[in-house]
Amino acid sequence: MKKNIRQRLTGKASLVGLLLIFIFPFALVVYQLIAEIDVGIDFAQKERLGIEYNQSLRKLLEPLVEYRRLSHDYLSVDRDLKAKLAHQQSQLAAEIYSIDTLDQQLGATLKTTAQWTAFKKQWQALKNQTSTLNSQESFDAHTVLINDGVSLILHVGDTSNLITDPVLDSYYLMDAVVTKLPPAIETTARVRDLNTDMARDSKITADEKAEITILSSSIKSPNEAVHRGMQVAYGFNSVLRNKLKANVDQSFTATNEFLELINQQRMSGQRVAIPQGDYFLAGTKAINAQFKLYDQVSPTLDKLLKERINRFTRKKYYILSFSLLVLGTISYVFWAFAQSLTKRQQSEKALRQAEEKYRRIFENAIHGIFQTTPEGHYLSANPALSRIYGYSSVEELIADLTNIEQQLYVSKNRRSEFQRLIQEHDVVSDFESQIHGKDGTLIWISENARAVRDGNGALLYYEGTVQDITPRKQAEEALRRSQQRLLFHLEHTSLAVIEWNLDFEVVEWNPAAEAIFGYTKSEAIGHHAAGLIVPESAKNHVNQVWQALLSQRGGTRSTNDNFTKDGRIITCDWYNTVLLDNNNNVIGVTSLVNDITEREQAKAELRQAKEAAEMANRAKSQFLANMSHELRTPLNAIIGYSEMLQEEAEDVEQEDFIPDLQKIHAAGQHLLGLINDILDLSKIEAGRMELYLETFDISAMAEDVVTTIQPLVEKNQNSLHVDCANNLGFMYADLTKVRQSLFNLLSNACKFTKQGTITLTVSRGSVGEREMGGGGDG
């Protein structure tokens, strides 16, 4: 065994070694080729970044050259150019903003940020100083700024690989847009502006003539170099001739014409013989032709670089494809060679893996898995099945269950039904049965099984799965009982339970609804509420209320008048709530209805009784007022006559009558007070009885009460005993109410006592104490 393993390992090692001997050198060559191509692609990509940056600088250079001329003219001869200067400043600001955005992207790669920032600061300072400079200072300062821009173009050419372009045609195009045209454009514009000024003055100095001669050579040399370089590029790439020749020739001719005009002026002495306008037009024509050539050459160069990148990319893909093809071929040969050695090993390994996988599935399945004989013996089972049946191990299950039909199923015919279904269909699905667990508990299971047969169709055994569905069956039973309870409540509740569909038609109608509205369930189902329990004439209004209800998500409560089958009008409390499906869509409404007609009638009767009581109370008050008036009139006469008789008795000195008359007068006053209190009953009922507080002598008040009550004491042959000291002090209270209280107590004692003794005791203490004593029969 070990020898076979060593032989297999040695064979594999030899194959791998042969493959590596070939692959390593091949991969190294391919890697170097691709790396070289990637360098070329990166080189050209960086050149394109430089072209993009310089194109933005060229867009800035043109308005900057024009701004130099306008500033010079504005400060020297023409103050009306202020609007043009402002417009030119706006254009320059836009171009500067564009370059700012580009510099944020490319500045780190092209190393331009420092120079560009310095350029912007120089421009800002120059713009702010324009009004303080003279024309020549302004011209010189702008020239310095333009030259800085040209230097930035040259810097980008250096940092973007443009200056070292390796292909002949693209190199001369680069030479034109990076090193030749930008300085030539600046110099041409400067010479144009200088000659225009000299033509305006109609004279030229020797120094100016020398300066123009030097500047002219700075124009002529790059102009000829560009023309010569383009001829070389045409020869290398004939396609460029058709694209560029017209603009190259136009720029070359226009520049030479401008140089010839300058040369004529140089030969004419110190007096300017050529008109100012001719200088300006010729110079402007040359500048425009140079800019136009730049705008033609720059995108053409970018296109050449893009085509070079595409060629590199295609070459890279060709190499990669060829490499993959070679590697694929070698790999296939290696695989075919090794296949004969590894096929058996792979088959054995796959078989072991399949067995292990099946064993893991079998052992770890959450459902029971079994194989049984047609006679009812278990051939195999997994741990999940033993757990479902309540056994501690598979071995115990197989040993104990030797007759499935007799030992397992609760229903003795269930195994026969299982076998019949498999005999007919070869499979059985969702076969639900109740079985005995090991400990005798009842378990619900669901079986899925199939018949396994031999080549001749003879039945070998059954195999399948078992799922414990006891919790589901218990839930179903709980749900059934819950539904029964709910149905019982619906059938026996005193509240009408009505279910409506979205069209406000009855879907459910319980017995309480039958009792309240008079319609049987069959009569109500499918009918609209309008015409059933509300008038047909109110159908439109009812539909509006119904649609508003459907738009809500909570419950609503209302009290409405409804019609019964026999036409009676009843008052009902309604509680409505919408029914929602699983997607939260409204599918109907359920209403709980309570007939409150009798309660409302009772409320109405109670209101009527209250109104009658209030009316009786008002009548009572009116009666008391009338009665007190009728009593007060003669009583005032008695009090008045008693006072007159008392005065007359005093005048005639009949002292014996005076005490009796005083008693009559005091009793009349007391009775008058009582009548006045009758008028205050309404105040008492409202809880607003008023007290009139005063300070009075207690002994005198008690003596006055005793004098007044004396006739009542004697009426039932009673005697009154008074225990009251003469100097008890004073009380701060309502004298009338205190006296009335004592009088009421003594009156009651006199009324219910016969031939007895009534005792009134008045004394001082922490709390006033009053005692009444009675004797005799009462």
Image: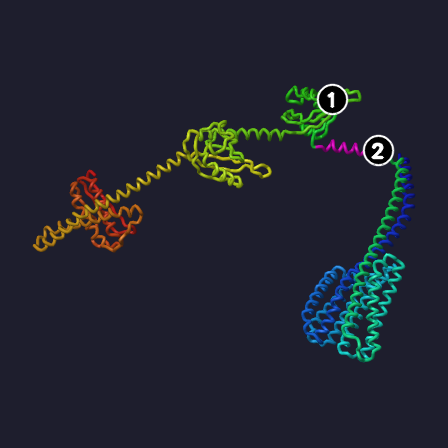
Could one spot residue 641 in this view of the protein? Answer: yes
Residue 213 place in picture, x, y as percent: 83, 75
Pointer 2 residue: 348
**Label 2 environment density (alpha carbons within 10 Å; few <14, some 14–19, many ≥20):** few
Reply yes or no: does residue 146 show up in magenta.
no
- Image: magenta residue range: 346-365
- Measured from the top left, where is residue 339 in percent x and y? 88, 36
For mark 1, what is the residue? 373
Rendering quarter of residue 134: bottom right
Q: Residue at the location (86% across, 35% down)? A: 345
The answer to whether residue 83 is above or below residue 242 is: below
**Residue drawn 79% across the image and 32% down it:** 355
| CA–CA distance in space, label 2 to label 1 | 31 Å
In the rendered view, would you say 360 is above or below 125? above
Q: Residue at x 83, y 79 (%)?
A: 269
Q: Nearer the viewer, residue 704 or 284?
A: 284
Q: Main secondary structure of the magenta part?
A: helix
Number of marks in picture:
2
Q: Badges 2 and 1: C-beta atoms under 8 Å apart?
A: no
> Earlier along the polypeptide chain: callout 2 or callout 1?
2
Residue type at tag 2: Glu
